[in-house]
Image: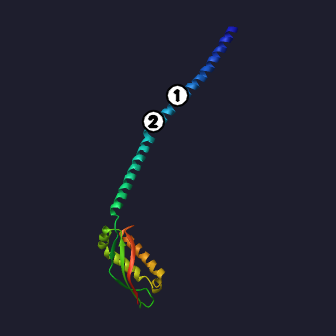
Amino acid sequence: MAKKKKTEETEEKIEKKGGKLKWIIIGVVVLGLLGGGGFFAYKYFLSPKENKEQVQNETKQTKQKEKQEETKEEEGPTEIYTLPSFIVNLADPLGRRYLKLSMDVELKNKKVVEEMEKKLPQIKDAIILLLSSKTFTDISTVKGKLELKSEIVARLTQILGQGKVLRVYFTELVVQ
């Protein structure tokens, strides 16, 4: 009987060790599968994104360099374009005052001058509408004249595009 008890006890120990061994083996297999799955996911899903980001960054950098080269080519002496004189009634209550305005526009380059000549009807319309909306009190002060200049630059920028119109110079301004 003693031998039977010893053999039973050793069998129980072996079964306990076998149970622990099974769990260890299962754990190693699960970790291996997770590691392999993680590597697969990294290789096929995460790694190409990094490459795409690198390609996108490189294309952005080349585009920026091209833009810088274009702006260097376009830089140079600015051009002055003389607009025809504008004569408009001011927005005064009795409508007795009028404004005669002549101005020169400083443009970025010759290409902008050509573009301005093509869009001259839109430019004249925008300036006439702006000038006719002003009252005598709006333009009688230096501050009012400076604001008018900035508003004209803003209108021209809307028509021609950002950065093409640099300044506006009044060559004649008569209010009567």
Question: Label 1 to label 2, Cα distance in Å?
Answer: 16 Å
Q: What x and y, as percent, mark residue 47?
A: 44, 41
Instruction: Name the mark on residue 104.
Output: none
Helix, strand or loop under label 2: helix
Q: What x and y, as percent, mark residue 174?
A: 39, 87
Q: What x and y, as percent, mark residue 152?
A: 40, 76
54 relative to 78, above or below: above
Classify the position of the C terminus by image quarter: bottom left
The answer to whether residue 1 shows anywhere in this view is no
| Residue drawn 33% across the image and 75% down it | 81
Helix, strand or loop under label 1: helix
Q: Which amino acid type is marked by label 1?
A: Val
2 relative to 148, above or below: above
Residue at the disc numbered 2: 40
Among the two numbered marks 1 and 2 on one chain, the one whose residue lies closer to the N terminus: 1
Residue at the disc numbered 1: 29
Residue situated in front as seen by the camera: 108 or 98: 108
Q: What x and y, as percent, mark residue 39?
A: 47, 35
Q: Quadrant of residue 83?
A: bottom left
